[in-house]
Amino acid sequence: MRIHLVALRAMILATVVLGVGYTALITGVGQLVLPAQANGSLIERDGEVVGSSLIGQSFVDADGVALPEYFQSRPSAAGDGYDGGASSGSNLGPENEDLVAAIEERRAAVAERDGVDPADVPADALTASASGLDPHISPAYALLQVDRVAEARGISVERVTELVETTMQGRGLGYLGESTVNVLELNLALDELEE
């Protein structure tokens, strides 16, 4: 009986120290040091949360058709698309017939929508990220969409290109990864530009 009581006390102590105390400590440090990140990097406009800079979202109408006045995100394999509760890639290999067909379908759709040669469509316009929630696209994909967005909004191509370049984020720590463009932040900047 004594062994059971010792084990029970050890479990209660570990739960309180590690489960409650450690969690409270890390949450408190996060709130003090990086409050925006600790709260989900939420983006607000007019007092309303419109998204997170860490989670992609689609810019389509009710029928799933891409809105021409907005930059489009990467494809998503998370649930029905950008579902944070179903974060995942497709897990399909590069020779999978379904993946190859989806890539070719996306290539044709992007080329038609943006009026470019299918060979010029960058890889991030065709494939989902590993999480299916990537909020970023490559500068090449953003610049590919400039003409369409400018025409749909009645803004000069130069002004939209300048906006893409000013919202471009460099490599992490100056050398990690590639430059990216956060699609939500770019589209919000576009909306503010017209106001």
Image: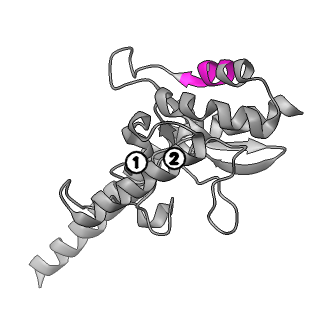
Q: Is residue 36 above or below residue 104?
A: above
Q: Element type at marker 1?
A: loop
Based on the picture, tell me whether residue 164 belongs to the magenta stretch: yes
Residue occupied by mark 2: 110
Q: Which mark is residue 126?
A: 1
The x and y percentages for residue 26 are 43, 43
On screen, residue 1 versus residue 74, left or right, reads left
Identify which residue is drawn at 74% across, 20% down. Answer: 159
Q: Earlier in the sequence, mark 2 or mark 1?
A: 2
The x and y percentages for residue 106 are 44, 53
On screen, residue 106 versus residue 48, left or right, reads left
Q: Amino acid at mark 2?
A: Val
Based on the picture, tell me whether residue 86 belongs to the magenta stretch: no
Which residue range is magenta in the image? Answer: 162-168
Identify which residue is drawn at 73% across, 32% down. Answer: 150
Q: Specify few, some or many for label 1: CA neighbours under 10 Å numbering under 14, 14-19, or 20 or more.
A: many
- Tell me the quadrant of the picture where the C terminus can be found: top right
Identify which residue is drawn at 53% across, 39% down. Answer: 37
Q: Is residue 158 above or below residue 86?
A: above
Identify which residue is drawn at 56% across, 35% down. Answer: 182
The answer to the question of whether label 2 and label 1 lie on touching residues, with beta carbons closer than 8 A, is yes
